[in-house]
Amino acid sequence: MNNKKLYPDSSVEISGIMATQYEKLLNILTLGTYSIFISHVIKKMKIRPDDKIIDFGAGNGYNACKMRKYLSDEGEITGLDIGEDMIKTFRKKCAGYKNVRIVKRRIDIPLPEEYTGKFDRAFISFVLHGLPHDSRLKVIENASKALKEGGNFFILDYNEFKIEEIPFYKRKVFEFIECPYAFGYIKHDWKKILSENGFGNFEEHFYFLNMVRLLRATKIK
Ligand SMILES: C[S@@+](CC[C@H](N)C(=O)[O-])C[C@H]1O[C@@H](n2cnc3c(N)ncnc32)[C@H](O)[C@@H]1O
């Protein structure tokens, strides 16, 4: 197995037990609330039965399994990921669901034409903060290209904040778990960046004492 990282400083390229047990580890970190949290987020996506959904950096299939419950046989989920262990676990978790698939593909380089204008919803959960900034912009371009006009892009990730202004205990946790890219991520104005990339009509929901945000952005052009 080749576990060489694309971006050595990134904390979102996950392998081994961290990949297979990802949601269990997060459940411990969130004091047992992870499942309820993700269910709440997915409810906010207002998935319709025939939606085509693309999940950027889909991980081990935990979120896809929860999203799938809202779909009919007409709906589809396409997960993209590069992590071998994540992909293997995704295939196990989602085995038996014909309309859920995972493709081994980088999300930070242009997607092939077959993805263009195909999706109603795009989701990215806890990936953007761990990428270099130029790569994040490439992901946003990909999401815009993959979505139909009027389609919705959902970014679940850290909220924007100034690290020096948050309480000491939150700062310590963030500094302990996060990679250098995350310190840049929280400083950006993501609604401005998304507006510059043809998105608008934003909606936000905040979790974990405002440290985490679900941001919905609609493709308007
Ligand atoms: C922190 S995990 C989150 C997984 C999932 N989205 C979730 O919330 O459970 C980040 C995921 O992004 C994937 N990833 C990181 N960089 C990527 C890239 N450049 N292209 C595709 N996937 C990537 C990793 O393999 C990993 O599965």
Image: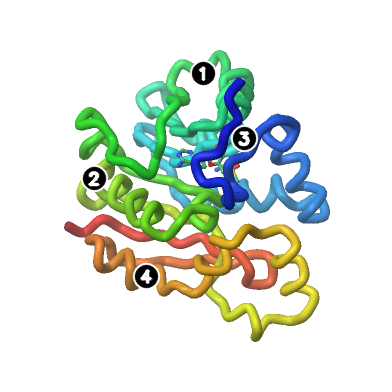
Q: Secondary structure beneath disc 3?
A: helix
The disc placed on residue 191 is 4
User: The N terminus appears in which quarter of the rendering?
Assistant: top right
Q: Sequence-wise, which precedes: disc 1 or disc 2?
A: 1
Report the Cα–Cα distance between label 1 and label 4: 35 Å
Q: Secondary structure beneath disc 4?
A: helix
The disc labelled 3 sits on which kind of residue? Tyr
Neighbours of disc 1 within 10 Å: few (<14), some (14-19), many (20+): some
Query: Going 37% across and 70% down the picture, which residue do you hit?
Result: 191
The percent position of residue 65, horizontal first and vertical second, equals 57, 31
Q: Secondary structure beneath disc 2?
A: helix
Q: Sequence-wise, which precedes: disc 1 or disc 3?
A: 3
Q: Place residue 193 in its image quadrant.
A: bottom left
Give the residue pinned by disc 3.
62
Give the residue pinned by disc 1.
97
Give the residue pinned by disc 2.
145
